[in-house]
Amino acid sequence: MTFRILHCSLVPLILISFSICTGEVCEQITDLNLKHSLLGTDLKVRLILYTRENTTCGRLLSHENPFETPTFNSTRPCTFIIHGYRPTGSPPVWMFTMVESILNRSDINVIVVDWNRGAANVNYFKVVKNTQTVADIITCFIQNAGLNLSSIHMIGVSLGAHISGFTGAKYNGSIGRITALDPAGPLFRGKSTEERLDPSDAQFVDALHTDMDAFGYRDSLGHIDYYANGGSDQPGCPKSIFSGSKYFKCDHQRSVFLYLDSMNQSRQINAYPCSDYSDFLDGKCLNCERFNSSGCPVFGYDVIRWRDVLLKLGQTMTFFTTNKEAPFYKSGYKVEIMSWNSEVRWGYITITLKNRAQETETRIDHKSYEFQQFNETTLLAQFERDVYPVEKITLKYVTANKLTSRYKLRVLRFRLTPLKSGLRPLCRYDLLLLENTDVTFRPISCHNNNNF
């Protein structure tokens, strides 16, 4: 995108409102309701500052004179959080958690861009039109505050992602980073780069897709694009319209909760570059040699560590899968099965990992797999939790066969390789799997001879 910076006097004034919090003047996001949305709201933008000195008490900033607020320090890095469309007028339930999580990680300015008056409107077309004006106001604030552009991080949710892009474009992509959480699709699909977020809007753009077949954007928008669970239907979200409003917003909103979970460094998710989700599920995209010693990039807040290598690689599409609720991290393994049946066998595999403390199970069934004699079939197994060390493994061979006697799958070699670096693969040789029957064994160290 290329835009000229508008003169600040052309931008609407910020709405000033107050709430009292423990004797201090504290600010919160404008709280509206469905009535406001039905009547329509005129755009008013408020910039609310949070720092480690006022983690729970937001302070109002003026876009024209930021230094009126004593706690504002322009030398600190700044992270802007920008919400999206608010059809019911309610404030985002996740906003304070995100502010708190960011301040737990970094001593910075966190600025919440409250444009609920303007986002709460049943007329989505008018709300989309307001996004350019919101970007103008943020641009004026950055200009008047004299911020270091490289130290700015904009986290935009849905329409907020495109607002971030419009803002970055006004500075010719000089701001440090834009994180787009399920960027909005309606009225942006098929648009030129001047009319939506694109990689040129910041030095580094990372985008997460969770609802690309409805409210989200399908195509790549960043230097790295994550497609969680393929980018559309998220586990745990309702599949029926009879579930009410959650049916419409769950997939779209999941992007925020995934990002929040990524700030917990103990359960970060690796994302795997791949051109197709099916290939990823087949275990064809688990090689991360292109990232050198860094390994595959993590999803979320800390992907900035991979910035330089990602910029060299160009736009990168990545995939990962998650649990249905936090913690979303899954424990991944590459599975290799070499069979020696004389006839081709088709089917699915269920794997259970056990030790004395716990067990976890997964069924690899996104398609029926072909097992040929002396050919190695590669699968991706993802478990809800880590079970380490693995003391026992249970395999089950499952088919759709109901008419003939039960099939047998003769396994010459079974190899289970943890995707987590530093862990050795586990093997077992010469197994006979009878259809729909559990076979439990203790894994052993793998032979060095890969041809066996």
Image (spheres, helix red, strand yellow):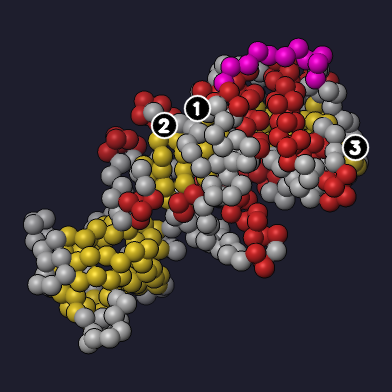
Is there a contact, CB below 8 Å, between mark 1 and mark 2? yes
The amino acid pointed to by label 2 is: Gln
* Residue that label 2 marks: 315
At mark 2, the secondary structure is loop
Residue type, numbered disc 1: Pro
The residue positioned 30% from the left and 76% from the top of the image is 399
Q: Quote the CA–CA distance across marks 2 and 3.
A: 44 Å
Mark 2 or 3: the one toward you: 2
Residue 165 percent coordinates (x, y): 60, 27
As measured in the structure, the alpha-carbon distance from the residue carrying label 1 to the one carrying label 2 is: 8 Å
Q: Which residues are magenta?
A: 1-11
Q: Callout 3: helix, strand or loop?
A: loop
Q: Which of these two is toward me, 122 or 160?
A: 122
Residue 10 in the figure: left or right of residue 214 = right
Task: Compute the Cα span from label 3 to label 1.
Answer: 38 Å
Residue hosting label 3: 18
The type of residue carrying mark 3 is Phe
Q: How many marks?
A: 3
Task: Name which quarter of the figure residue 17 lies in.
Answer: top right
**Depicted 410 relative to depicted 413: above or below:** below
Residue at 75% x, 31% y is 130
Q: Position of residue 183 (x, y in %)?
A: 59, 39
